[in-house]
Image (cartoon, grey):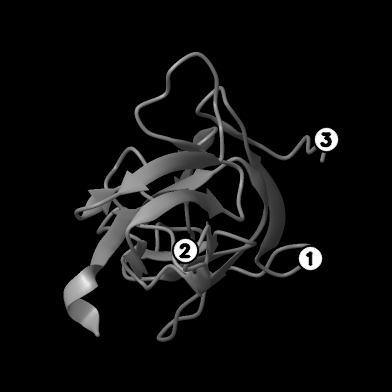
Amino acid sequence: KDDDRFGISGRIVLSDGRGLAGVPMTLAGPDGDSTVTNRSGDYYFLAKKGTYTVSAGADVCAEPMVDECLNSRQVEVGGSKTVNFRPRGEGLVEGHVLGPDSKPKANATVRLVGKDGTTVVTDGQGYYAARVPKGKYVLTASATDPPVKAGDPPTKTDYCADNSGEATTDCHY
């Protein structure tokens, strides 16, 4: 019967408000459960009254941070509870995509492939920017009519986002 059960929910978000999808979440306690965050970074559990620990299977910190970054938070359930998380670190991967004529390529699709990757589209000047959690990413760019300029290797570069907020090709992970 759901009348004696309460919602425990939250979201994992970057500083730009984008949610992290696919993060494993665990509810430990009398009515334990597990799930993954949806495309918006949201998760939800339904649990009976009791003491629970909400844990995220990623390098994130429960909010508000007290003295240290912990990827879990204990809650006393007797009503609905919210536990939100943020990545421990994040960075901005940005740059320009060029067409075969070496001119900026508008509307090119740029994919940052990695555990918490994303996809962005270049602006009219060929510029792209993506905020991602700390980690290693493979960057690819693609477009048609005309395609993006070939590189060596073709349109693929490893980038790392770190706590400095900047991206680098000097990855130490």
For the residue marked with disc 1, what is the amino acid? Pro
Viewer-nearest residue: 46 or 153: 46
Q: Do the residues bearing badges 1 and 3 touch, measured as CB atoms within 8 Å?
A: no
Which quadrant is the C terminus positioned in? top right
Viewer-nearest residue: 134 or 120: 134
Q: Distance of mark 1 from mark 3, alpha carbons?
A: 21 Å
Q: Distance of mark 2 from mark 1, alpha carbons?
A: 21 Å
Residue 44 in view (yes/no)? no
Q: Is mark 2 on a helix, strand or loop?
A: strand
Residue occupied by mark 3: 172
Which residue lies at the image location 54% right of the left edge and 26% below the top edge? 69
Which residue lies at the image location 24% right of the left edge and 52% below the top edge? 78
Task: Give residue 26's position: percent from left, percent from top.
Answer: 54, 62
Which residue lies at the image location 45% right of the left edge and 79% below the top edge? 143
Which residue lies at the image location 27% right of the left edge and 58% below the top edge? 123
Q: Dot 3, how many residues are within 10 Å of its Cα: few (below 14), some (14-19), or many (20+)?
A: few
For the residue marked with disc 2, what is the amino acid? Thr
Q: Dot 2, how many residues are within 10 Å of its Cα: few (below 14), some (14-19), or many (20+)?
A: some
Q: Residue 173 carries which label?
A: none
11 w.r.t. 151: above or below: above
Q: Distance of mark 2 from mark 3, alpha carbons?
A: 21 Å
For the residue marked with disc 3, what is the amino acid? His
41 w.r.t. 85: above or below: below
Q: Is mark 1 on a helix, strand or loop?
A: loop
Residue occupied by mark 1: 153
Residue occupied by mark 2: 118
Residue 120 in view (yes/no)? yes
